[in-house]
Amino acid sequence: MEMESSNMPEQNPSEQARNPQPVTPSPMMHQTVSEPIAQMPRKSPGSGGNALVAVLIVILALATVGNGALAIQSNSKVSSTNSDLAAAQSANSSLQASIAQQQTAANTLSASVATLQQTVSKLTGTTTPTPTTTDFVTPAKMIEPQVVYIEVTDRTGGGSGSGTIIRSDGYVLTNQHVIAGATSISVTLKTGEKFTATLVDSSADLDAAILKMNTTRTDLPTVTIGSSASVVIGQEILTCGFPLGSDLFGNAVFGPATFNAGVVSAIRNLPSGNTDNPAFTLNYIQIDADINPGNSGGGLFTLDGKLVGIPSYGFATGINTAIPIDAVKALIQSSVK
């Protein structure tokens, strides 16, 4: 049976592929065909969290880098400060060393100046005097209790003089002319205590006499006997005694003793002023300290408190003499037993 041919021309399969024919829906089916929906790109699960983590990592990295930079900067400042401190310490050490060197140089210079001054003094024959202040207070306090006031009565009335205690049981040294012709003798201490006394021995040539106080005391303050041979011209001295006696005291309480300061003016060989023997002479100690009536028999002292003479005669103002203590030591030794 022959098939009727269609009026539609046949298409080449390749053309069908290029031009597909629309499909006509079957009347048996009711199919709703929706328009094509635009496709949105899909995100993979967790992609938002990963981005946040990445941002935080970047921030932390930046912070770490910043902190590292700050730390490096801080360490750099510390190192710089330490270097500055070390430099300052080194500079201070150098300064101290320089000061020490300068002090040493100054000391050396001072020593050189002193040596130069000594050399100049030797060349010129002069020396620069050193100002001094003489202490008379200390020896005066020591000496005064050792000096006594002597009163005598004789056929014509009486008189007074001074003396020094040479032994603690009451032996007293004075001038022979103070007690010459006495019928009674009394000795008064600095304290005002008064004792009678007797003559032990005397020498008119030496103008010296030894008395013994009538007392049982053995604690009386005594002088320290020095040596007149050590006395030199220009040496400072003190005299102590009771010039003018009761005329000076008046009605007042007894004492105190009188001190005079001066220097040794000369060592002068003279005949004794208390004897008729012109052949007898002494090396009198001439002093410029005053010797007034009543000073006779007292003490001539060095500034360390040693008895070196017995004030005896005053010729004129500033010209006075004392008997050298070495001349009467034999009399003292023979009388004080």
Image (cartoon, rainbow, N blue to C red):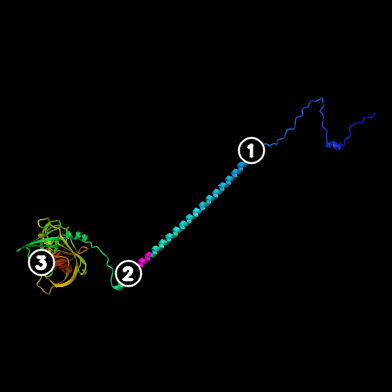
Q: Give the amino acid at mark 2.
A: Gln
The secondary structure type at the circle numbered 2 is: helix
Give above or below for 246 relative to 14. Answer: below
Magenta stretch holds residue 112: yes
Q: Is residue 116 left or right of residue 4?
A: left
x and y percent of residue 312 in the render? 13, 67
Residue at the disc numbered 2: 117
Q: Which residues are magenta?
A: 106-113
Mark 2 closeness class: few <14, some 14–19, many ≥20 residues within 10 Å = some
Dot in front, 2 or 3: 2
Nearest the camera: 23 or 337? Answer: 23
Q: Is residue 106 left or right of residue 42?
A: left
Q: Are marks 3 and 1 in contact (CB under 8 Å)?
A: no
Residue at the disc numbered 3: 177
Q: Are marks 2 and 3 in contact (CB under 8 Å)?
A: no
Q: Give the amino acid at mark 1.
A: Gly
x and y percent of residue 72 in the render? 55, 50
Residue at the disc numbered 1: 49
Prevailing secondary structure of the magenta residues:
helix
Which of the 4 image quadrants contains residue 15? top right
Q: Earlier in the sequence, mark 3 or mark 1?
A: 1
x and y percent of residue 208 in the render? 13, 67
Dot in front, 1 or 2: 1
Residue furthest to the right = 1
- Point 14% across, 72% down: residue: 270
